[in-house]
């Protein structure tokens, strides 16, 4: 995944380009949720989301310029066209850190495209071409299946879109599958990651595009995932963090969403915030028991379907759905 400039951790983990960050501290909690909460959004189907993860993984690693990348992109476009009011493909050629030309493809699926009030939901759909965090050095040049680190977020968006096609929200919603997020290397600088969001941030799919706020989904499918408050999300969009986390607690997902402050992660939301001014948060798996601060399968050949949990997908998807439907 990204350069992960991550000083994230209750255990005060230090990361290479972040410097000495202060120890994370517990964020303020809000008033306890009512015992009986009345959900207004459609019921998110964890089985369906799991299926959407598996469909992406079946193509193999979705590395830019590969046949699997092309085939999966075609699948995502066709699937979103079943549900959304409008689907736009943003194709471009960008330079990788090694100067190689990459054919990238951001896919934007919109509901109520003319509505002025809008919420952006996004995830990256590409796979990392090297499993450089794998404990076996012989796997370091092997591409990653990216079931969690990529496909899980896209699968949540697909299931949300499927539900919205039946029970349409009153506001505008834009799902964006961002490309070329996971090709970077830490020694090449943070901008070697997130090429699709950098391109989209500078050249939106519609000139002057704006949304009230955005939610990035990254690694949202693993068993016992833990989500805490990420640094750039706090810096640019703390009210959105509170809105989403409070909603998760109301829905009963306190075993996934924690009111703890972490460090800064260079992810797609950073560029959306800085290039567009749309306040955007990152829902991303944090694992305090690993040296990286991410789950053990991160950037390894083990990022496969064995790690995907329907309950985690449902917790994230239902939370984001409820947030959106309460905006109606």
Image: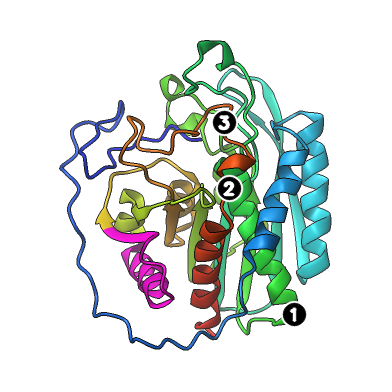
Q: Residue at x 41, y 73 (%)?
A: 252
Residue 179 versus residue 76 in the image, above or below:
above
* Apparent side of residue 65 relative to residue 15 in the rendered image (left or right): right
Determine if the magenta segment contains residue 254. Answer: yes
Work out whether mark 3 precedes mark 1 in sequence or the reverse, and give the earlier one: 1
The span from disc 3 to disc 1 (Cα, nearest Å) is 36 Å
Q: Residues within 10 Å of mark 3 (few under 14, many from 20)?
A: some
Q: Which residue is mark 1?
A: 166
Q: Residues within 10 Å of mark 2 (few under 14, many from 20)?
A: many
Residue 83 versus residue 277 in the image, above or below:
below
* Secondary structure mainly formed by the magenta segment: helix
Place of residue 166 in the rendered image (x, y in percent of width and height, measured from the top left): 75, 80
Residue 206 visible to the viewer:
no
The span from disc 2 to disc 1 (Cα, nearest Å) is 26 Å
Q: Quadrant of the C terminus?
A: bottom right
Q: Nearer the viewer, mark 2 or mark 1?
A: 2
In the image, which residues are magenta?
A: 237-259
Q: Residue at x 69, y 68 (%)?
A: 161
Work out whether mark 2 precedes mark 3 in sequence or the reverse, and give the earlier one: 3
Q: Which mark is residue 302?
A: 3
Place of residue 249 in the rendered image (x, y in percent of width and height, measured from the top left): 37, 72
Q: Quadrant of residue 296?
A: top left
Q: Which residue is mark 2?
A: 308
Q: Nearer the viewer, mark 3 or mark 1?
A: 3
Q: Residue at x 54, y 70 (%)?
A: 318
The span from disc 2 to disc 3 (Cα, nearest Å) is 11 Å
Q: Work out whether residue 55 or residue 322 is closer to the camera in this orientation and state it.
A: 55
Place of residue 143 in the rendered image (x, y in percent of width and height, measured from the top left): 64, 25
Q: Residues within 10 Å of mark 1 (few under 14, many from 20)?
A: few
Residue 262 visible to the viewer:
yes
Label 2 SS: loop
Q: Quadrant of residue 292?
A: top left
């Amino acid at each position: 995944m990204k350069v992960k400039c991550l000083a994230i951790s209750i255990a005060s983990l230090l990361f290479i380009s972040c410097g000495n960050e202060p120890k994370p501290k517990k964020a303020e909690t809000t008033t306890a949720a009512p015992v009986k909460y009345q959900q207004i959004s459609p019921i998110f189907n964890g089985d369906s989301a799991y299926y959407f993860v598996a469909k992406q993984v079946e193509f193999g690693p979705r590395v830019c310029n590969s046949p699997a990348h092309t085939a999966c992109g075609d699948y995502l476009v066709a699937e979103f066209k079943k549900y959304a009011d409008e689907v736009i493909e943003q194709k471009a050629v960008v330079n990788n850190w090694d100067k190689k030309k990459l054919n990238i493809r951001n896919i934007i699926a919109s509901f109520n495209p003319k509505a002025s009030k809008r919420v952006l939901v996004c995830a990256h759909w590409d796979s990392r071409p090297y499993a450089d965090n794998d404990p076996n050095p012989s796997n370091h040049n092997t591409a990653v299946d990216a079931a969690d680190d990529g496909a899980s977020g896209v699968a949540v968006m697909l299931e949300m879109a499927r539900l919205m096609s039946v029970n349409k929200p009153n506001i505008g919603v834009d799902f964006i599958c961002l490309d070329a997020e996971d090709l970077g290397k830490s020694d090449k600088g943070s901008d070697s990651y997130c090429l699709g969001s950098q391109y989209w941030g500078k050249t939106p799919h519609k000139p002057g595009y704006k949304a009230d706020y955005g939610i990035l989904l990254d690694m949202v499918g693993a068993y016992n995932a833990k989500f805490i408050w990420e640094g750039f999300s706090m810096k640019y969009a703390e009210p959105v963090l509170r809105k989403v986390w409070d909603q998760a607690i109301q829905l009963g997902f306190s075993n996934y969403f924690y009111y703890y402050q972490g460090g800064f992660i260079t992810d797609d939301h950073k560029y959306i915030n800085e290039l567009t001014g749309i306040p955007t948060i990152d829902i991303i798996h944090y694992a305090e028991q690993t040296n990286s601060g991410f789950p053990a399968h991160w950037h390894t050949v083990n990022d496969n379907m064995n790690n995907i949990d329907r309950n985690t997908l449902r917790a994230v998807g239902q939370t984001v759905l409820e947030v959106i439907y309460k905006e109606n």
